[in-house]
Image: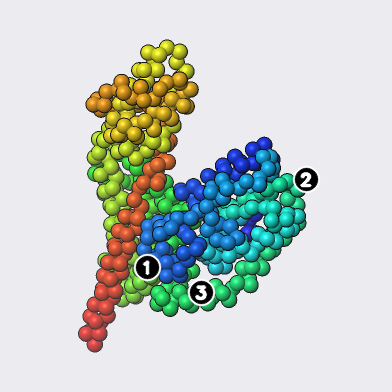
Amino acid sequence: MSSSNIVVRVKYQNCNDLRKSVGKTISYISDKKKADATSIDEYDILKDYMQFANNDSYLYEDKESFTWSNNGDIDARKELLNMNDLDSKGTLWSLVISFPPEFAINNGLITKVDYYNLTKNIMPQLLTGMGFKMNNVTWYCSLHRNTDNPHLHINFFEHHKTISNPKVPYDVIHKLKSNIANYLIDNEKFYKLRDEEFKSITGSISLAELTRIKNQKLFGDKYRRDLNNMLFNLYEVLPPKGRLQYNSKNMAPYKSQLNNIIEYILLHDSTKYKYARYIKLLDEHQKELTAIYGSSSANKNIEYYNNQINKLYAKIGNEILSNYKIYQSIGTMEKEKEFLKKHIKDLKFKSSAYKKQDNIDKVAKDLNRICNLAGLNLLEKRYVFKNWISRSNYNINVDALLSSMDNINTDMSSTEYYSILKKLNYDYDRYSKYKNKMFYQELNYKKFINQAMNYLEYELEQEEKQIINELEYDLSEY
């Protein structure tokens, strides 16, 4: 087992307000967009199957819990509030332990409980190795799957300061990595038994294999981001008009780019094995045809392999191009309206430090028009306006301001729209960059994967029928 697969990063901060600093780290590691929310206390192996096989989100669970400590699920915020014996100043250590996805799966680190059992084993040794007294230290963990590699966030601090040098010695980190490796080796038998139990429930499916299939979802969804990035780059350069079909002349300049996307789709975990089988069938069939009919240009089957591949690529490619046509058919302001409905609360509106109230009022009216376009209710508007006022450092009563606003006017041209956004600290480039980022998250890439799977299965079936028919024909000749 290579220690390079176990990456450990540690930092510390000397805090003038220890409670506040700890509270910030709890907020970060408990972020719903990053942290695995499954409950350790409610662990059930059958839930693993339901979670990995059927649900679109690995955060699905009856009980949400983002942090744990030695005894299982904890509410870290609540524990902090109830902590009376805490020095005002102190040191907060933050530890991140990450693993490559394949390494994690192969070594049994699949469910949140697997990571919990690991930390329960290694943390006491780490803390005592650093010289802490166990009754004077608090530690809590969170598992994040929002990046390419699954990783643990572990934070710990003393209630009353005793450690004079907060720097963690290299030999302590080396010992920690060694303890992790030993733990994984020692638990190899347990993981095998767990997998056998899982198979008894699910038939022939192993938990490791099922997780491997879903690893683009569990480990940051790198595949989705990469595919959506490729799709967006293609959609950016395609002409808005003209015949866009896979084999049309208009597609010639973009064919290579489109083929790269199709190949990436066909190499997805859910399609790659069927695709490899299809390629093998075509290759064998082509060799048979060439052996029977020769390799001269008179043989109409000489390009059979390439023609079949082109047919499959055309089906998937036209699906991608059809999605682009639908996107292009929507009017500019309709697109902006749909985008605002989803993301207006995340936009960090801010305007200049105007001295005249008239100028502030004009921007406020423009912001109100944007809110109306997004269809916000009064409570939602209040949230947007309050953040705008705060970021702009204005001394304005948000409720009084909103009460003076017109809630009817929503009509505006795209020129007006972008002009208003510029006043709110979003010039065209910044706004476009943010929209592009959101595009990667919103594009339904699964639709392309599922369609490719359907096309591939159909072509496989047709190829197998073709081979059987030709074999039967050959036999009838004798």
* Earlier sequence position, callout 3 versus callout 1: 3
* Image location (x, y in percent) of residue 343: 37, 38
Spatial distance from mark 3 to mark 1, Cα to Cα? 29 Å
Looking at the image, do the residues carrying marks 1 and 2 touch, with CB atoms under 8 Å apart? no
Q: Which residue is mark 1?
A: 274
Q: What's the residue type where badge 3 is placed?
A: Arg
* Element at label 1: helix
| Residue 332 visible in rendering | no
Residue at 32%, 59% in the rendered image:
450
Mark identifier at residue 258: none
* Element at label 2: loop
Instruction: Indicate whether 253 appears above or below 427.
Output: below
Q: What's the residue type where badge 2 is placed?
A: Ser
Q: Quadrant of the C terminus?
A: bottom left
Describe residue 367's horizontal placement relative to residue 29 as left or right.
Answer: left
Q: Quadrant of the N terminus?
A: bottom right
* Image location (x, y in percent) of residue 200: 43, 78
Q: Tell me where residue 412 sits by quadrant.
A: top left
Mark identifier at residue 194: 3
Residue at 31%, 76% in the rendered image:
292
* Earlier sequence position, callout 2 versus callout 3: 2
* Element at label 3: helix
Q: Which residue is mark 2?
A: 164
Q: Tell me where residue 140 sits by quadrant.
A: bottom right
| Residue 190 visible in rendering | yes
